[in-house]
Amino acid sequence: MDSDDKTQITSTSCDQHCLSVTKNWKIPPYVGRWATRVLVGFVLWATVWSIVGRDALPGGNIYGLSILLAVAALAGFLVRVIPWLRLPSLLGMLITGFVLKNVDGIDVAKDIDNDWSLTIRNVALVVILLRSGLGLDQNALKNAKWTISRLALLPCISEAIAVAIMGHLLLDMGFLWSFQLGFLIAAVSPAVVVPSLLELQEKGYGVDQGIPTLGVASASLENVFAISLVGVFLGLAFSEGKLAYNIFRGPIEIVLGIAIGLIIGPLLWILPCKHKNSAPQKNRFVLLSSLGLLSLFGLRRANFSGAGALGSLVLSFVAGLGWSESDKKQIGEAMSVVWDFFMPLLFALIGAEVNVEYMESRLIGRGIAILVVGMIPRLLMVYFVVSRNNFTRKEKIFLMLSWIPKATVQAAIGSITLDAARDKGFVGQYQERHGVEILTLSVLSILITAPIGAIAMTVTGQKLLQKSNVVSGDPDNADENEKIELTNDIGYV
């Protein structure tokens, strides 16, 4: 008998024994699952404490991250499974981060180092982009390439112009500053949109119409465009760099991100080499993850931060084109496991970026007005862009709702103008004041649009989108898949 067979038999016997004990003692299976998670979490924390010491104790960076992860995971679980709530789990995680940052007495998130927070959020973004790249539909992407371009650019430009004009009128900003605000606010959040679309895709909703692929690709491209334009107007405002380079920075980053995926992706078709008793999926998972991280962080080092996210998405998509469906499925499942760990950290850390210290009372009313006025042309433009496609009215409405959430870019670079002003010594001058105003509106946009957009997508997705006959490659019905997913969430596995 092979060792693998022995291992499988032993594992099966252990599983049967655990089920027998659970049944005889009348213990709900999810209790055992959560008890295991608590034990694992405690052991990991104790191990880290034994290595790093004080940093893992109250007041330390690692302690803050540990509490944030544990509470966010629990909050996400509760808002999803409590019958009278049934809200998206990311909403509970966002609220957790906000509370642990801003409520006196339990504000452990204040102890988290900003560099650690930014790094973890970027790693989580790479994970979800790699996972979504493997799930992109090649045919849908080919058929909707022009729609993707228009959906990525036109709503973003429309909102940025509206926000810039309102910022000039209500906050007395010069246009170089108000356009920084406009393109910063205009970037949709892949961290909110992509997981929601992937969840609907796994249940078979919108798949035949290519809506998940359209949303994932457009959101990623829009982020590159928005980040690049923020950099352009930031450079012009502080007279940094050459004018021609600042103007063409956006197209350069888009081309660079696509080129990285097209060049490096095919290498993963042939590497690692297959041989007897090899497990290429494991090596491909490691290579894909490492290259995705290198794309994002490496290009940030080279001052092309916008290109890194697009490079990770294209890399994953191109690599998947040369893999078998079995390999893609196994690597995708591995990415899902990693995402389950990073998801609470990502959304809790985004929530922790909402700092009430920057919520100046005089700005809140004007800021809300600016956000509302900016959202109107954005949503109208989304409807106009997709009207030229064969979408139903319900599908068009869903696409409009999915273009509401803001979080990723706003949390990552919301303070960039303020940091630049202070670094250059403009403390107490209009440059610093505009930096505070831009940061405040970034915080407001996260606080208002991320929960509204997430709830809207979750609540309306299955009502507005058509269900495919094939769900995640299997001819199971959607209702059964929903039961399986809920079962996994509460521990009946």
Image (cartoon, rainbow, N blue to C red):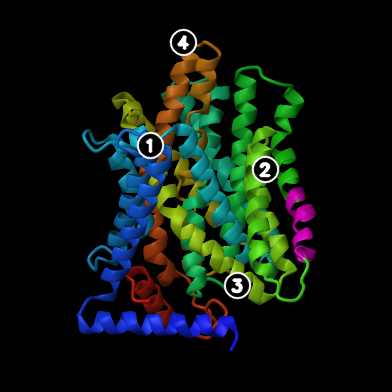
| Residue 111 position in % (x across, y down) | 35, 33
Q: Secondary structure at mark 3?
A: helix
Q: Secondary structure at mark 4?
A: loop
Amino acid type for the residue under numbered disc 3? Lys
Q: Is residue 428 above or below residue 191?
A: above
Disc 1 marks which residue?
A: 53
Disc 4 marks which residue?
A: 429
Asked if residue 466 lies in the magenta stretch, the reply is: no
Q: Is residue 246 in view?
A: yes
Q: Nearer the viewer, residue 446 or 284?
A: 284
| Residue 390 position in % (x across, y down) | 60, 69
Q: Relative to residue 85, is residue 190 drawn left or right?
A: right
How far apart marks 1 and 3 lie (CA) works out to 40 Å
Foreground mark, 3 or 2?
Answer: 3
Residue shown at the point (58%, 55%) measured from the top left: 129
Foreground mark, 3 or 4?
Answer: 3
Q: Is residue 210 in view?
A: no
Which is more N-terminal, label 2 or label 1?
A: 1
Dot 4, how many residues are within 10 Å of its Cα: few (below 14), some (14-19), or many (20+)? Answer: few
The range drawn in magenta is: 259-272
Disc 3 marks which residue?
A: 329
Disc 2 marks which residue?
A: 307
Q: Nearer the viewer, residue 373 or 196?
A: 196
Which is more N-terminal, label 1 or label 4?
A: 1
Dot 1, how many residues are within 10 Å of its Cα: few (below 14), some (14-19), or many (20+)? Answer: few
Q: Quadrant of the C terminus?
A: bottom left
Which is more N-terminal, label 4 or label 3?
A: 3
Amino acid type for the residue under numbered disc 1? Gly
Foreground mark, 2 or 4?
Answer: 2
Which is more N-terminal, label 3 or label 1?
A: 1
Residue shown at the point (45%, 50%) measured from the top left: 404
How far apart marks 3 and 4 lie (CA) works out to 55 Å
